Image (cartoon, rainbow, N blue to C red):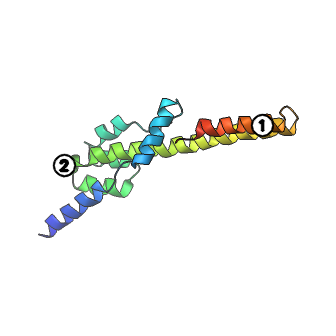
Amino acid sequence: MKKIILFLTLFLFASCATGLTTRQEHELSTYKARGMAVEEKSVGAGVGLGFLPGGGSFYARHYGLGVCNLLFWPLSIFWDPVSGANGAESINYYATIEEVKRLQRAEIRQLDRDLEDGKLDRNSYIAKKRDVEDKYTVD
């Protein structure tokens, strides 16, 4: 009975490694369409490694879950591929968000320099800054 409870607890814990929220999926797909997405981890590799003992979770940097899945292998092949895919997608999302913020800051810094150096007047600066903000904003 204790093993069944432990198994169910682990299964529920493993399934908690959910993917992105709907909003995050929308943001990531928008950045992919704009060619701004960062693919730090392969979702396919996360799935494939999920069939190895703890591989999907380790790949997705969920080390504690990876150890649990290692211990419960081969049962963990029912959830670890999903965990690996979700984790890879999550890593890619956060890497993309950081890169987008970095690019936006760099463009705005350049606009600030151009304004300070007199290359832009105030109205042009405001218009270009709005363009930069629109470029990096997801509605």
Q: Is residue 98 left or right of residue 77?
A: right
| Residue 59 in the image: above or below residue 12 | above
Check disc 1 and report the residue beneath it. 125
Marks 1,2: beta carbons within 8 A: no
Check disc 2 and report the residue beneath it. 74
Q: Is residue 41 left or right of residue 118?
A: left
Q: Mark 2 belongs to which amino acid?
A: Pro
Residue 92 in view: no
x and y percentages locating residue 6 in the rendered image: 20, 65
Q: Considering depth in this image, is 40 or 110 the residue closer to the camera? A: 110
Q: Residues within 10 Å of mark 1 (few under 14, many from 20)?
A: some
| Residue 69 in the image: above or below residue 126 | below
x and y percentages locating residue 117 in the rendered image: 87, 36
> Dividing the image into 4 quarters, which one contains the N terminus?
bottom left
Q: Mark 1 belongs to which amino acid?
A: Tyr
Q: Give SS at disc 1.
A: helix
First in sequence: mark 1 or mark 2?
A: 2
Q: Looking at the image, how many numbered discs can be counted on the residues?
A: 2
